[in-house]
Amino acid sequence: MSKKDSDIPWVEKYRPKSIKEMALPTARLGRQRINLSEELENFVKHFFEERKKVNIENKEIREFNRTVIEKEQKEEKKISSDIAAVLLEGPPGIGKTSIVYALANDFNMEVIETNASDTRTRSTLERRLKETTKSRGIMDFISESKEKLILIDEIDGIYGVQDRGAIPTVLDLIQNTQFPIIMCSNEYKTNLQPLYNKINRYEVHPLPKNEVIKIANNIIKKENITNLKNEDLELIIDKNNGDLRGVINDIQGICQGKIEGDVRDLILSLHRDNLEEIFTLIRDLFKVSSLKEARDLTDKSDVDYNFLYKWINENLLTFMKSNRDLANAFENLSLADEIFGRIRTTQYWGLLPYFFDLFAGGVALSRKDTPVSKGFQRVVFPRYTSGTYFSLTPAEKEFVEKLKRKYQISQIDFIQDFLPFLKILCGTSRKQLKSVSDWLELDAKEKSLLK
Amino acid sequence: MTEEIPIWRIKYHPKNLDEISGRETVKETLKHIIQQNNFPHLLLVGSNGIGKTIIAQLFSKEFLGKDYNANFKLVYADVPLTDEERKEAKAEAYVSTNKIGSSAGRSITTPAFIQARVKPFVQLKVLGNAPFKILVVKNFEALGSNQQSFRRLMEIYGNNCRMILITTNVSSIINPIVSRCQIILISRVKFVEFKELILYIAKKESLEISDECIEILYRISDSKISRAIDLLQLSSINGNNITVEILYENAQKFHNDLIKSLLLLAFKGDFPKARELSRKILSSYKFSAHEFYRLILIEINNLPLSKFTRIKLINLIADSDFRTLDGRDIDIQISALLSKICLFSEYM
């Protein structure tokens, strides 16, 4: 293996060159099972036939338009949307992008790709794609250049303020395109509804396990990997749950590193599963013995630190028992929280390093009196989320509304002053409870507030 | 009255200005205003739960007469906006491009509270024959820096709508607002008047109550009438003869012991239980963190502690309250406070 070769991610290296050599994921259109490769090949062929037809017609129309006044001019024809574009929808890493590249390779086309790493506002999309889709480049007239295939990857990532106006642009694009468009998306999104109405949406399913094993074994053979046991491979595949890209990445990650000791641990540490990741992260965090270890742990994980420190808050009690440890840990955690709040209000991100060190290392290293437990320790969800706003449950709201018809009271006074009194009053006897609830015309749900 | 109201507090709720016990000078001033059929913006000042709001309401009712329902609104400055109100405020903040002026096509940054709760009311014309509308803003000090935007509001819409601002604390209200208002101080109800009211209720409910009991009632309830009536009703359940013992017993029940038991748990050093209780208190009473600290502070002053301990505890609370101001997670801050008290209790 040349040195340069080893730098390429294997995912890229083993990306299928042709649609024939790739393991095709199963797909559905609506309820109907389809053969994705046939379908896509037909789509491309059909598109170019249609384009040829439409272009000839348009040429005639244009010539006709030149001879008549504006009122009598005919409109130019357009390729209908479902011929011009398709959408592939399925979980990440099952080969949606690969199939498009393989397809382009088969037809000797050039792929023009835009993905979520580009900002896709109206103007950037137009700049990048519209010119390509409409015109046919100056070189097209001189020599027979490659046809193009437009790939809008991760279209469900079009989202938020930055990509404002992108969906209409895409729709516009589809109507005026000179090249076939394939879009990929991970999941159903309501803001893509206008798209779904116009084009065919193929649901692509993950590869079956035996296919994944076949591909993985192929790579293992080619890369001369000897130290990966079969059961470890299966562990990797199970863990990734149909995500072929994840499998290949994991194999590369494990095999290119130094393999000493237990491979199994390494595999498990490469999890992508978020929840399990938090669990292990928290367990590991309380085992660290230096600040650097703690920092490494939080750096490596892609758990959102917004949540992470709440998880730590909830689980501190499991790992620390003595009051001294707890007080020290909470001192650091509360300071971290304060710093985080200040960062958010003042946007002074320079404070962030303190936040990281305090909430992770600062908390974990506060443990002095409590010995490290050998046994398994249960990590729990943050149960208590304190809202910043005063909010009532629906039953409480109903109660106040009913009360307000007879007695003017604010929600805060009701909860803090009046409801406690009513509880005591109604707790004295059933008669009291009945008379109060009858008078206020309460239903069973609101009545239960009084108990 | 056709139906019996089971809650005395509501049953003996004053129906007009005259029924409000005591506060003769205030009542006189307000009646004078009603005669003149005009008044400036008012600022009602007085401590918690002594009847500022009910006075403002009854006054407006008498002032507006039959146009009361259409021209009166009561808003609470400390009740946060609901999501819908927030959305509405955001939508309304946009000035259409059809309009002329530098703000056309932009969104204006009026605080959402005013946009959603105040402006829709004050901008509408007066309905009926009333001289102007009345807007009552309760807990005005809770507006904080949003008070500034009230200044112009009071001038621009002053002709259309008079405001009655209610607060517990004049010093937390910015000067420009104070200078735009006539201040009316509302005092606590005096014992004589309190006694009159209690005797009236006792007569109606055929209770027997001694002067001594009334005095104790006055003290326990902190001269807050609604609380005193609540207590009286509770005490009357077991018999018509109210004695000192019954009063105390019920006051005990009534008195919020949760904070005290929370502190005692912390003093014992039982952090897990203390945290559990603090969460329970916060979720059932929906205190703001600041309110919660204030209650703990009050409780600490009531508990028999040495002066050293007390000052140390106050120090801890102050630190925690201070951090909550900037922090994002109330639970972390309160847990931190409790854990520190737990640790401190080992040296107490």
Image (cartoon, coloured by chain):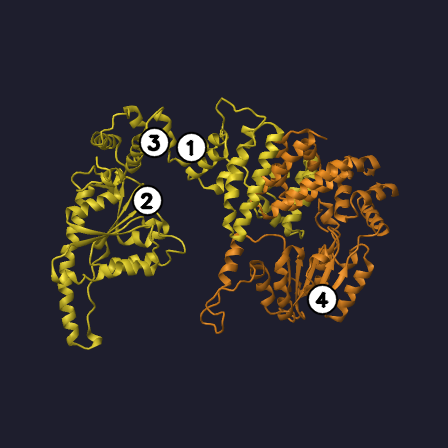
Chain colours: A yellow, B orange
As rendered, which of A387 and A441 lies closer to the eye?
Answer: A387
- Asked if marks 2 and 1 fall on the same chain, the answer is yes
Label 3 – label 2 distance at C-alpha: 19 Å
Kindly identify which residue carries mark 4. Answer: B179
Which residue, as the protein is rendered here, is positioned at the far left? A143
Residue A12: image location, x then y, percent: 25, 41
Which residue, as the protein is rendered here, is positioned at the far front? A3
The mark closer to the camera, 3 or 2, is 3
Kindly identify which residue carries mark 3. Answer: A239
**Callout 1 amino acid:** Glu
Q: Which chain carries label 2?
A: A
Q: Mark 1 lies on which chain?
A: A
The answer to whether the residues at label 2 and label 4 have Cβ atoms under 8 Å apart is: no
Kindly identify which residue carries mark 2. Answer: A186
Q: Residue A276 carries which label?
A: 1
Residue A229: image location, x then y, percent: 28, 24
